[in-house]
Every structure is written in structure tokens, then in C-alpha cells.
Amino acid sequence: MTDLFSKFDPLIEQRRALLSTGVTDPFNLVMEKVVSPTVAMCNGRETILLGTYNYMGMTFDPDVIAAGKQALDDFGAGTTGSRVLNGTYAGHRAVEDALKDFYGMDHAMVFSTGYQANLGIISTIAGKGDYIILDIDSHASIWDGCKMGDAEVVPFKHNDIEAMEKRLKRIPEGAGKLVVLEGVYSMLGDIAPLKEMIAVAKKHGAMVLVDEAHSMGFIGPNGRGVAEDQGCLDDVDFVIGTFSKSVGTVGGFCVSNHPKFEIMRLVCRPYVFTASLPPSVVATACTSIRKLMHAGDKRAHLWENSRTLHKGLRDAGFTLGTDEPQSAIIAVIMPDLERGALMWEALLEEGLYVNLARPPATPAGMTLLRCSLCAEHSAEQVQTIIGMFERAGKRAGIIG
Amino acid sequence: MDRAETAAKIAALIEPFNKKGVAITDASTFAGDLEFDSLTVMDFVAEIEDAFDIIISMNQQAEIENYGQLIDAVVKLQG
């Protein structure tokens, strides 16, 4: 018998070698209690959270929590069914209305996760004979959406407008074209030149899908994302987003002005053949989204946090993923996985939680310590974080 | 461009990517013999695409395992 698991042997060995050094397993941390959007108890120690994507700190918003409790009382714990059959409750419609208002768009469709939103929309709209032109650094959910569909998949170099245009030009006359971009790329925290890229895509007759998972609520005058910030949201055919970042719960969505968009509800398999979100989740999401429409002060404070942390870490001697802070993600580049894990552990001992990111999630084989800031991090917390990085960096031999 | 011309052009293009100086035949595999990782594949495919003004989609790349198959595919894609 061939052991089907033998293909995982190299990864099993890499993991064994890493853990045999005695380092804490960076991919198995348990948070015993979550105290606030920015603090949790880990290994009995109070730990500052700097890796939760909780950009706007909505997870403990009193209105959000109250809405969730009310929905539990009024609608019960779960839906048990598909949106198309028995799984659409008033709350699902309400959160879709909130999304339409938030983005100023005609249609909104909610999925059970952001992953499923990309999986479903991309695999359904780009079919046999169509072409998907996508950035090579796209999120796994975008790649999996491509793999699940029947379109021809054509990647181009990250954020390279010329490489994208060359490929668009070579696509056979008359073929359907979907350009897939992200507002913020979550590994390095860099943004895309959407205005230029979308103009090129439109010139070549492509439809455009932009994943704004890491920008919603924070980037753009109304928090609609990088496309809004760059003044090109009207040219985006499909915006994909998530409830698991700024919105502070779980779920995914697509908003669009396409006149035929509603047919997606019948043809998109990751929407049809899965259970819908529970009432408490859609109620919290709905309340959170409506509050995020008026969160200008929080957005300003989060930008301040991002600028302060970026400057503090750069001044301390760390190598960062971007020259300037472009989002609420600051990526600290580690020399290799072993030292990355050591640094991660040293930070945890200081009382700071960040994400250790490694290939295949990261571009160019990099190991990253990825920090995602929150609007609820106080200015003092950010200074504390910088001090923790300095001490841990010296202890792990990352900075001099 | 016929197969011989295409092969000659690809031979020149692959040289900077063949860091270990492997003697390349039609049977040489990219993942095995040439030890191309996914990043090298991306850069190499982009070079080929630009040089011949073609698209080699991911779907087509999945069918190409060795050097000879690449030449055949490029000959075909030039139409």
C-alpha cells in the first residue's frame, strides 16, 4: 500500500526539525481568554494582540455584541440550511442591505467566509474559454477559485502594470476576460496601483474583480477600500470582502452593480451548497458595517498607529516589507524560518502576539513576522510594542 | 518559426536560469533536473511569453514537464 501521506514527509520533517530546537510551536498558540480587541491571555500571560486583522476593533463593540445576543434570542443558534432553501433569515437580507449602503452599490451577496466568496464568484463567472488575468501574489482563495473553474489562468508579476497589459493584449479576440486584483496584499501590506491597472484592464475590455479584504473599513474616505481611495471604485465590477477583518466577525461577500448579478444566487455552488451564516453572526456584521460608515476618527487613529509602528521598527533596524506604511499591516522580514520562529517566541515571551508567515503563503520564499494594527491600540500600546520588538530583536539576534 | 529555430531561441533564453549548468536535453524536467522552483518558473515563463509574444496559461503549464514539451508547446502556440 502506498501511504498517501508520504507526499507530506518533507513538511513533516521541516516541522520536526524546527520544534526539536525547543522553540514554541508558532502555528499552535491557544488564546485562553480574549480581554479586549487588543489584549488576550496566552500561556497565562497578558499578551498584546498584533496579529488578528481586527483593524477597527469591532469585536467588543457594545452595540455589535448586543445585536448578536438579541439575534440569538430571536432567531436561535443556527440556520442549518443553504441560503437558497431554508437558510435566508431577515438578518441575511439586513446585512446585504447594510453592504449595499456601505459601498453605494446595487447588489450584495453574503457568503459563509471570505474564502468562499472568492472561490464562488471567480469559479462561476469565468468559465471555459474565458481568461483570468491575476497578480502572482494573489491570496490562496483567489488561486483556488481559478483552479475550481474552467477558465485559462494567466498570472503576471506582482503589481506590474506593463506585464499585465502585455498579457491582456495577447488574449484571443472575443474571449471573456476577468482581471483579479487585491487592494491590499496581506503578506507585505502593500497596496496595488488600482487606478492605473483598472484603466488598462478596461481599455482591453476586461471585467475587474478587486479583493478589498484588508482595506474595508479603514482605507478610503468612507472605508470602502483602496479603489475608493484612488477614485476608481466605479470601474470595479466586483468587490470581494470579508467580515473577519474590520467587521469583526466571520463571513464573506461580493458587491456589484452588474444588472444581472442576482443570478449568482442560483449558479454559484459555494453559495448554494453550504449552510448560511448563523443569525447572531449576520446581526453583529450588520451592526458593525453600519457603524463603520461613520468611523472617520478611528480610521485616522489607525493610520497614526501604522505610521508610528512603521517608523519605530525601521528606526530600530528592522527590515520591513514596504518603505512607507501603506495599510494596517506592517511586515517585518526575517532572515529565515528558524530565526523567524525564535523572534516570534521572544516576542511572545515579551507579551506580544504577531503572525509568523512562511511559504507558500509569503512571496519570494520569505519568512515574515506580520503585524496587523488595530484602531483600538492606544498610542502607549504602540510604544510598548516597539520596545518589545527592540528587546526581542536583540535577544534573537535579528538587530544589533 | 519552425521547431529548430524555436529550440535555438529557447536555448538562449534558458541559459541564465540554468544556474547549475545542467546539460539540457528534450527529456530534462524543469522541477527535477533543472530544480526550478515556482518563482523561477514564473520568471522563465514570462521571458518565453515576451520573446514569442504568446500566453502560456497555468493550465498549459501544468502539461509541460520537460524541455521538449516546452518547445513543442511554444511551436504550437505561435500558430
Image (cartoon, coloured by chain):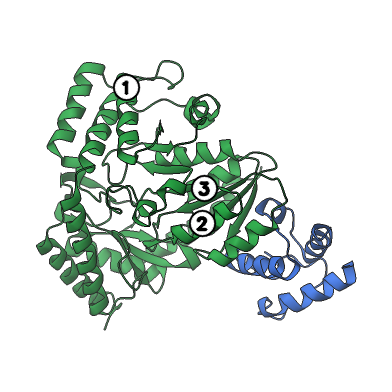
Quadrant position of residue A77? top left
Residue type at mark 3 is Val
| Chain coloured green | A
Chain of the residue under the numbered disc 3 shown in the image: A
Label placed on residue A193? none
Chain of the residue under the numbered disc 2 shown in the image: A
Cβ atoms under marks 2 and 1 closer than 8 Å? no
| Residue A335 locus on image (x, y percent) | 39, 74
| Residue A289 locus on image (x, y percent) | 26, 38
Q: Which residue is mark 2?
A: A199
Label placed on residue A78? 1
Question: Chain B colour?
Answer: blue
Q: Which residue is mark 3?
A: A208
Residue type at mark 2 is Ala
Which residue lies at the image location 65% right of the left edge and 44% below the top edge?
Answer: A176
Label 1 or label 3, whichever comes before in sequence order: 1
Q: Secondary structure at mark 2?
A: helix
| Residue A292 locus on image (x, y percent) | 23, 43
Which residue lies at the image location 48% right of the left edge and 27% below the top edge?
Answer: A262
Q: CA distance from mark 2 to mark 1?
A: 43 Å
